[in-house]
């Protein structure tokens, strides 16, 4: 089939986490400002250039990225697209290998190559647009990346050698971007970083997360501020009284703990131990008793035997996290764990352990949600789906947490607006409510 010219049509495909999504948003704003036609995650035909923003964190994510690249290479061979570019974490981490193995890709770029991509497209990078982006989320919420990279040396993590060392964005740049987002209709800011707790230390020689959040609350139009990915070591505890006293800061703490057994935590090269973790969690419950606490755990890490796994299960049962996710350990080349430990457990065993933790959490979540029945909460409406309006409370982040379902009936609710909603029933992961 003869190729047709579609040079002005560019399709961005985004894989992976919310940090990747922000990178795609920045790239799309620059492309659009150059007068090129831009789309996101469209079907594979009809674009002159496809740019795949890949994830390279763990095996499943790498496999998805490779499959997506091959999908668009085949589309190129059929004449459905003209060029395929690959950017992002997988390309940063494995560029030499990819250039050898998948030569049909027209160009590979790393995680910091947006300027190079713009130039390759024959466009100009516009410095006046720094801080501006084309939102891929619903217009009422946006992710706000406040730093890049990480200085931690966790045994299982490849982020430091993909994204580099921790680099905080200047506070004034973040505030300026927040103002731009409010002009686009954003009401909820979701602060993201590889390590939110460390924000500011490299620039100001002290942690500045609390000051940043306090400054963001002063911006008119922002109604919710949500914190994602706070590291437990040196957690900025001065943010807790601010969270408890300021209605703009969601009572929501995302703190990936990974494990509770001291031996496993030591092998993971985590700076916190069991005693300090319990002490920190207790401070959350005391200072912000209404906060929803989300954590992420890692099962199957070298050193986790049956005894250590049982301790982890007991921890989950005892603390009763409001939100919890689990990942099976992935033996990633280049990491400390890969170089120093044997991957002792089968993938099946790791997955069984992950499933076991989630079954415990399912019962906890069912009971905690049941306790919300009869209460009234401020709810933001994210979308309409079938017979329901789908919303969230301050205790829930988009895509990963609970949702509030409101039967449409004769209601006429507005996406992105807040409503007072009474909870009338609950399941493990969803609430059913009615607007007052």
Image (cartoon, grey):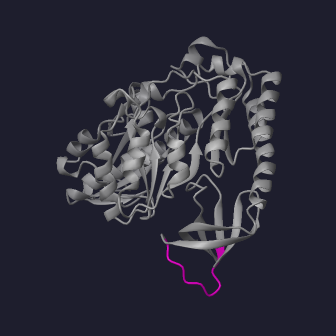
Q: Indicate the quadrant where residue 98 lies.
A: top left
Question: In the depicted view, which residue is nearer to us: 351 or 8?
Answer: 351
| Residue under the point 60% across and 52% down | 400
**Is residue 296 depicted above or below 95 in this figure?**
below
Question: Camera-side residue: 228 or 334?
Answer: 228
* The N terminus, quarter of image: bottom left
Q: Which image quadrant for residue 10?
A: bottom left
Q: What residue is at 41 percent from the left and 35 percent from the top?
A: 199
Query: How many numbered marks appear?
Result: 0
Q: Which part of the image, by quadrant, shows the C terminus?
A: bottom right
Residue farthest toward the bottom in the current orientation of the protein: 410
Query: What span is colored magenta in the figure?
Result: 406-415
* Residue 302 seen from this side: no
157 in magenta: no
| Name of the residue lying farthest toward the top | 340
Q: Position of residue 358 (x, y in %)?
A: 75, 43
Give the percent coordinates (x, y) of residue 324: 68, 44
Residue 306 placed where, x, y %?
A: 82, 24
Find residue 264 and report its horizontal and vertical position in percent: 69, 20
Main SS, magenta residues: loop
Classify residue 412 as left or right of residue 36: right
Residue drawn at the location 38% of the way across and 52% of the way down: 216
| Relative vertical location of residue 40 with respect to residue 17 in this rendering, above or below | below
Relative depth, front residue between 218 and 48: 218
Left or right: 310 in relation to 420: right
Query: Per the image, is 412 magenta?
Result: yes
* Residue 65 appears in the rendering: yes
Which residue is at a point 71% across and 44% down the rendered structure image? 321
């Amino acid at each position: 089939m003869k190729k047709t010219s579609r040079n002005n049509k560019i399709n961005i495909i985004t894989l992976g986490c919310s940090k990747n999504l922000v990178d795609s948003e920045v790239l799309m704003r620059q492309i659009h400002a150059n007068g090129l036609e831009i789309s996101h995650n469209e079907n594979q035909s009809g674009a002159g250039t496809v740019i795949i923003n890949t994830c390279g964190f763990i095996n499943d994510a790498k496999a998805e990225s490779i499959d997506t690249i091959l999908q668009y290479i085949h589309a190129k061979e059929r004449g459905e697209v003209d060029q395929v570019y690959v950017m992002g974490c997988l390309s940063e981490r494995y560029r030499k290998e990819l250039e050898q193995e998948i030569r049909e890709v027209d160009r590979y770029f790393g995680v910091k190559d947006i300027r190079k991509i713009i130039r390759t497209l024959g466009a100009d990078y516009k410095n006046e647009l720094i801080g501006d982006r084309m939102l891929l989320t619903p217009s009422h919420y946006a992710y706000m990346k406040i730093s890049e990279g990480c200085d931690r040396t966790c045994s299982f993590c490849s982020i430091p050698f993909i994204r580099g060392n921790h680099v905080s964005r200047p506070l004034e740049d973040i505030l300026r971007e927040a103002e731009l987002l409010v002009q686009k209709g954003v009401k909820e800011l979701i602060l993201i970083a590889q390590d939110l707790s460390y924000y500011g230390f490299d620039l100001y020689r002290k942690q500045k997360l609390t000051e940043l959040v306090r400054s963001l609350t002063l911006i008119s139009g922002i109604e919710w501020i949500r914190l994602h990915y706070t590291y437990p070591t040196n957690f900025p505890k001065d943010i807790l009284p601010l969270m408890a006293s300021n209605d703009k800061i969601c009572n929501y703490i995302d703190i990936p703990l990974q494990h509770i057994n001291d031996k496993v935590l030591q092998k993971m090269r985590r700076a916190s131990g069991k005693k300090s973790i319990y002490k920190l969690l207790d401070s959350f419950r005391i200072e912000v008793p209404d906060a929803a606490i989300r954590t992420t755990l890692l099962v199957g890490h070298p050193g986790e035997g049956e005894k250590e796994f049982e301790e982890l299960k007991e921890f989950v049962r005892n603390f009763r996290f409001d939100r919890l996710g689990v990942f099976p350990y992935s033996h990633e080349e280049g990491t400390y764990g890969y170089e120093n430990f044997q991957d002792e457990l089968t993938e099946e065993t790791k997955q069984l352990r992950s499933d076991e933790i989630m079954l415990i959490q399912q019962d906890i979540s069912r009971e905690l949600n049941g306790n919300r029945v009869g209460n009234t909460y401020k709810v933001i409406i994210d979308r309409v789906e079938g017979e329901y309006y789908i919303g969230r409370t301050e205790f829930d982040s988009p895509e990963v947490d609970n949702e509030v379902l409101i039967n449409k009936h004769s209601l006429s609710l507005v996406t992105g607006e807040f409503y007072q909603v009474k909870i009338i029933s609950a399941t493990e992961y969803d609430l059913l409510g009615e607007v007052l």
